[in-house]
Image: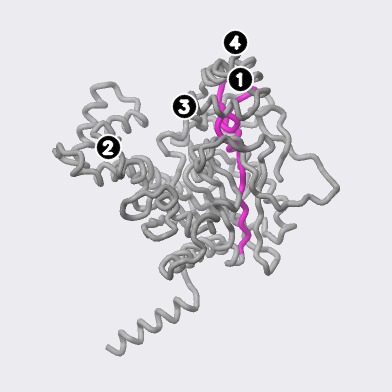
Amino acid sequence: MISDKFNHFFKDSLPTLPFNEIYEAFDDSTACPQKEEFNNTIVGEMQCLRLNIYVPKSLNNNLPVLIYFYGGTFEIGFAGRYLYGPKYLVRHEIILVTVNYRLGPYGFLCTDSSNAIGNQGLKDQKKAIVWIRENIGVFGGDKDRITVSGHSYGASGVDLLLHSLHINEKLFHKVIIQSGTSYFPEIMAKPNNSVPFELAKRLGFKTAQLDLAIDFLSKENYKDVINAAVELDVKFYCCNENYFSGAQNFLTDYPINLNTPIVEGMSILIGNTNNERAHNYYGKKNLNFDIFQDHLQIAFNFDDEHLLNTKEIVKKQYIGNEKNIDMVENNIVQFSSDFYYYHPTKRNVLKYIDNGAKKVYNYLFSYDGNRNFLKKTFNLNGSGAFHADEIGYLFDISFMDKTLTIEDMLIVDRITTLWANFVKSGYVFFLNYRYIWWLLFELIIILHK
């Protein structure tokens, strides 16, 4: 348990009060307020900052630690075993810690008021890392061998953390960044004072004073606040925070303007699936040629003429002069994947190298099996691995079939071994006795021939 108190629901969390009785830590179902993705119901509770620590049965001391932050567009996600079962990873003699952090208006309400300066969810992540570093020894973990990881927006949060830390804040030693970076086109925005007014008005309170609107929202039932945000289709971003006396800033500039000196000497594993954006388009009716201009407008502040010229250049690069949209579906998916994921990942890799990272590994996950998370959960069709599809091979997801095919088990073994070896040593390699014997067998056959 990280904290169960806030000095204000839109400000920093406070440490939990000391207690002498035994805390029965058996329920990992707590979630922060949100409209969850499976049944589209509003769930959660305000005292949601919990972390789950999973240790191997061997209970050895000084084990390496893997911290994991879920994705979900800063609006959905939770850290429990329903999605993030630890079995596949902890069997490799590492400790897994999954962490809740605030979402939506409670985690990312960014304004010009000291009562909601923004990035509360990212500050929750940082506080969780500090807590883990200070306490993981009690659970057999080594505070000097901590790897911080995340997926999608959770990965973006990890990358933003690298941009926000000072050189003397060595809170962890390695990072794993899966399908998300701080260069994601829709990850950051300026503080937006209109959001509290819109939410308050939706809930029946009109005011011209920003702090009054924020104070009203802090006293309203969280389900009503979340529901208002959903009905208004409010998007929440991390932001460049304003300076206020006594406030702890997380980020005050865009990552593109910042270096990451904290990565000097650090090992980094970063990558993507091979068909990241396929779920946005395959089998849907929203495929059209406007995608080129729509995407460019998100990331660039071009005047109309420059935007149109750039759009034509990019469009020709990906689809040539093709007029039939159905003939270039794969090309358009590739463009969208390049725009949102592959190009940002490449820029991050180069920045890490320029800032002195010890080793940077860039992976690509392309396996298509029975545990591809997004494809199986939402019954999607298409080749390769979609966004989040690797999660089913890293985690024992509760609602997936417990009987694995030989092929799926092989991928589970390989990816969890690669991840665990990186957590242990900072190197990515796959080595076990079964694999060694297979190599020897192949070598004997080749020599015999």
- What residue is rendered at 65% in x and 65% in y? 56
Q: Which label sits in the foreground, 4 or 1? A: 4
Q: Amino acid at mark 3?
A: Asp
Mark 3, other Cα within 10 Å: few <14 / some 14–19 / many ≥20: few
For residue 96: magenta? Answer: yes
Mark 4, other Cα within 10 Å: few <14 / some 14–19 / many ≥20: few
Provide the residue designation for mark 3: 233
Task: Please provide percent x and percent y for residue 138.
Answer: 75, 57
Q: Amino acid at mark 4?
A: Thr
Count up the numbered dots: 4
Mark 3 falls on what kind of element?
Answer: loop
Label 2, label 4: how far apart the Cα atoms are: 41 Å
Q: Which label sits in the foreground, 3 or 1? A: 3
Label 4 or label 1, whichever comes before in sequence order:
1
Label 3 or label 4, whichever comes before in sequence order:
4
Tag 3 and tag 1, C-beta contact below 8 Å:
no
Label 2, label 3: how far apart the Cα atoms are: 22 Å
Q: Amino acid at mark 2?
A: Leu
